[in-house]
Image (cartoon, grey):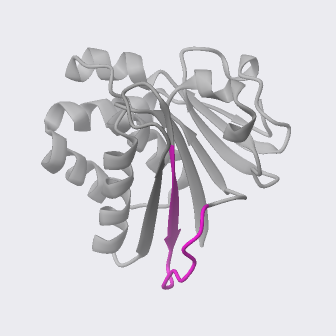
């Protein structure tokens, strides 16, 4: 089982993106679980969620305290200690940022760091600063935890072809650093 923790801000589409990942996992014969967590429910406030993907039934129903993968939809959240807390040694961090990976201040236990300007891509492709579908393209490429073709098809069905284009562009535009930033 792989455990993921997603961090974003209200209005960035974190919940919808997570539902698409779980839907795709289930449709392709895997198991998936998403548990959202909301504090203050307003646009721009920090939100996060817990995602599990497995080839076996998932019985655990808790928060993810030691994620294998962190997905960060807003790089300003990296300034909050809770964002990277508990990342497993060698874990993967996928960040929406226009900055260079080495300037993000990621923890030393990060094994793979992937950075893409998902907001810039979303603005160019869909005309709105909603980076969720672009980040899904990055997630599929970096982790391989979900069938990429099926995920892209679900993105198009749910949000339209422009969002699929954003996911493809993010997938292809990733900056990946092995062994941390």
- Check if residue 54 falls in the magenta segment: yes
Quarter of the image where the N terminus is located: bottom right
Quarter of the image where the C terminus is located: top right
Indicate the quadrant where residue 36 lies. Answer: bottom left
Q: Is residue 42 above or below residue 87?
A: above
Indicate the quadrant where residue 94 lies. Answer: top right
Nearer to us in this view, 45 or 89: 45
Residue at 67%, 47% (x, y): give it.
92
Check the image and name the residue furthest to the front. Answer: 40
1 relative to 34 in the view: left or right:
right
18 relative to 143 in the view: left or right:
left
- Check if residue 6 falls in the magenta segment: no
60 relative to 26 in the view: left or right:
right
Residue at 33%, 56% (x, y): give it.
19
Residue at 82%, 53% (x, y): give it.
89
Indicate the quadrant where residue 71 lies. Answer: top right
Q: Is residue 59 above or below residue 166?
A: below
Q: Is residue 92 above or below residue 120?
A: below
Residue at 16%, 48% (x, y): give it.
158
Nearer to us in this view, 70 or 27: 70
**Numbered disc total:** 0
| Residue stretch rendered in magenta on the structure | 48-63
Nearer to us in this view, 145 or 20: 20
Q: Position of residue 112 (x, y in %)?
A: 70, 42
Q: Position of residue 167 (x, y in %)?
A: 33, 36
Q: Position of residue 126 (x, y in %)?
A: 21, 23
21 relative to 173 in the view: left or right:
left
Nearer to us in this view, 18 or 163: 18
């Amino acid at each position: 089982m792989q455990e993921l923790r997603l961090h974003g801000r209200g209005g960035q589409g974190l919940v919808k993106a997570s539902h698409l990942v779980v839907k795709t996992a289930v449709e392709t014969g895997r198991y998936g679980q998403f548990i959202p967590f909301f504090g203050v429910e307003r646009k721009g406030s920090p939100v996060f969620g817990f995602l599990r993907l497995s080839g076996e039934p998932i019985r655990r129903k808790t928060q993810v305290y030691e994620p294998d993968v962190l997905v960060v939809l807003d790089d300003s959240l990296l300034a909050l200690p809770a964002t990277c807390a508990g990342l497993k040694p060698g874990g993967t961090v996928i960040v929406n940022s226009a900055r260079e990976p080495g300037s993000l201040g990621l923890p030393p236990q990060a094994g793979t760091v992937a950075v893409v300007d998902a907001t810039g891509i979303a603005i160019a492709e869909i005309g709105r600063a909603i980076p969720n579908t672009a980040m899904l393209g990055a997630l599929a490429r970096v982790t391989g935890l979900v069938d990429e073709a099926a995920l892209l098809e679900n993105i198009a069905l749910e949000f339209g072809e422009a969002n699929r284009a954003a996911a493809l562009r993010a997938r292809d535009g990733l900056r990946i650093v092995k062994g941390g930033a």
